[in-house]
Image (tube, grey):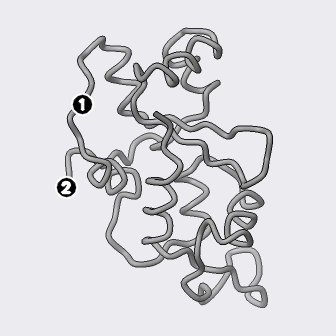
Amino acid sequence: MDPLTCHDVAPLWTVSGASGYLRRPDEEVRRWIENGRLEWAWDIGRPGSRRREIRVWYRSLEVCKGRRPASTLSPETVVAAIIGHNRPALRVSEVCAILNCNRNLVRRLLESGELLSYGTAQRSCQSQLRRLPLVARASLENFLRRRRLF
């Protein structure tokens, strides 16, 4: 197993979750994202939205909390660790778990072309009649590369 793959906790955390973990106010966590102290953060919000949907990689929180120097990991390595497998397609529920968001946001990202569909799932847990789209792994990788905050 890849040592960067983290299956025991959600890979991406909200700002409020990060502030709780670090025991710091939300505004301080946002400043740390902007100045690079938390080096792996993304805005996953839908295009055109005024509201930012910031997510922080759990490993960045660990580095920050331990006051260790920033990592030398490549974006490809981090994205692979966040996704956690090599399958070419992901279910919407997997993408929701990875991005720490709801299905509506994933649906809007698919509708806007930010994420690309890879066909449909054989069955939905909610209904056998309604098939949910699969998300192309490559589009999720590209999305995370494009949306990284520096």
Which residue sits at x=56%, y=50%?
Answer: 99
For residue 18, above or below residue 67: below
In the rendered structure, the answer to whether residue 37 lies left or right of residue 108 reads left
Which residue sits at x=51%, y=19%?
Answer: 21
Please tell me whether mark 2 or mark 1 is closer to you in this view.
1
- Where is residue 106? Give x, y as percent: 68, 62
The tag on residue 71 is: 1
- Where is residue 27? Give x, y as percent: 64, 14
Residue type at tag 1: Ser
Residue in the foreground of this view, choosing between 129 and 117: 117
Residue in the foreground of this view, choosing between 49 and 22: 49
For residue 26, above or below residue 79: above
Earlier residue among tags 2 and 1: 2
Q: CA distance from mark 2 to mark 1?
A: 20 Å
Residue type at tag 2: Met
- Where is residue 85? Give x, y as percent: 34, 65
Q: Which residue is mark 2?
A: 1
Assess disc 2: are there few (<14), some (14-19) or many (≥20) residues with their C-alpha within 10 Å of its C-alpha: few
Q: Quadrant of residue 39?
A: top left
